[in-house]
Image (cartoon, rainbow, N blue to C red):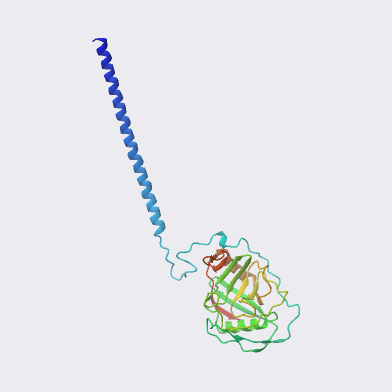
């Protein structure tokens, strides 16, 4: 075999080996592409299953639940809707610097707005301005025990006891919770809108020395001398509240722990409203209100 022929054969074999190696690389590239495509397809399928599971879960409220306690479109409140802290020390009881007379005159005036729940106003006239009256609120979150103080606000106490006796507060929902700056739970409106009342009003029974803090029970109002049926329980801070709200009693320490639970569950704020002021996420329904005989 001549040298030239031998060189030619070597060149052919080299070219063949190069072609075989290129074919093998091409085959490997093809297999890699198929493998990657398969992996991507599996990931997409898994992701699709996750999305379907997350969006087709049964979020219909269970029997007996209400929209406010188990809202179908409402997630649990975030940290911005809950109190950062709640004071545990009870506020010192309020006392009038100058005691009232043994009896005071109370006048209950018919309101322009109709009553949210039909009741009769208390009779006008003289009312005793001393003594205390216990009232128990049996609620969906536990019992809340009030002590009404006629030496502070005899007309407010007379009105509240009249409403209790007429079952005005029974089967009503506390419509407002605030969790920062001012920490109160507000109740007493059968319409649960914040604008309802008993169809009558009475004057404020306030004095400059009034203080608001944990355990204070007071009347809500929409301005001077507009007291009706709405009341609020201070469970925490209220240092910035001016003495414009009639204090007519206290709430005991055990009951305040029940309200703490409601506060720590957070607020469902109104659209466009403050994140710390709105309906309680944990519904508070007053089943019955009962005065001791």
- Residue shown at the point (62%, 72%) measured from the top left: 233
At which x and y percent is residue 208?
72, 75
- Residue shown at the point (55%, 68%) measured from the top left: 278
In the rendered image, which quarter is residue 61 located in?
A: bottom left
Does residue 292 show up?
no
- Residue shown at the point (57%, 69%) measured from the top left: 177
At which x and y percent is residue 42?
36, 46
Q: Nearer the viewer, residue 144 or 201?
A: 201
Toward the top, the furthest residue is: 2
At which x and y percent is residue 28?
33, 33
Quadrant occupied by the N terminus: top left
Q: Nearer the viewer, residue 17 or 151?
A: 17
Quadrant occupied by the C terminus: bottom right
In the rendered image, which quarter is residue 154 located in?
A: bottom right
At which x and y percent is residue 235?
63, 69
Is 141 left or right of 212, judged from the image as shown? left
Does residue 44 show up?
yes
Toward the left, the furthest residue is: 1
Is 218 left or right of 101, judged from the image as shown? left
């Amino acid at each position: 075999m001549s040298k030239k022929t031998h060189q030619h054969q070597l060149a052919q074999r080299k070219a063949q080996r190069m072609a075989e190696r290129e074919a093998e690389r091409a085959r490997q590239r093809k297999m890699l592409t198929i493998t990657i495509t398969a992996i991507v397809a599996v990931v997409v399928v898994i992701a699709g299953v996750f999305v379907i599971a997350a969006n087709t879960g049964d979020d219909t409220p269970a029997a007996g639940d209400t929209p406010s306690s188990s809202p179908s479109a409402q997630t649990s409140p975030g940290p911005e809707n809950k109190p950062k802290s709640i004071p545990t020390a009870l506020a010192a009881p309020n006392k009038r610097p100058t005691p009232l007379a043994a009896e005071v005159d109370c006048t209950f005036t018919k309101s322009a707005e109709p009553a949210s729940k039909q009741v009769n106003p208390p009779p006008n006239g003289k009312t005793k301005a001393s003594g205390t009256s216990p009232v128990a609120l049996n609620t969906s979150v536990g019992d809340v025990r009030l002590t009404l103080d006629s030496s502070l606000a005899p007309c407010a106490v007379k009105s509240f006891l009249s409403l209790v006796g007429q079952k005005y507060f029974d089967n009503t929902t506390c419509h407002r919770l605030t969790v920062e700056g001012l920490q109160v739970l507000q109740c007493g409106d059968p319409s649960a809108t914040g604008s309802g009342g008993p169809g009558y009003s009475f004057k404020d029974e306030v004095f400059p020395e009034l203080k608001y803090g944990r355990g204070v029970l007071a009347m809500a109002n929409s301005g001077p001398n507009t007291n009706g049926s709405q009341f609020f329980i201070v469970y925490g801070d209220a240092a910035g509240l001016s003495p414009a709200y009639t204090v007519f009693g206290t709430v005991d320490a055990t009951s305040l722990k029940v309200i703490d639970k409601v506060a720590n569950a957070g607020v469902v704020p109104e659209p466009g409203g403050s994140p710390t002021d709105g309906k309680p996420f944990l519904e508070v329904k007053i089943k019955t209100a009962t005065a001791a005989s």
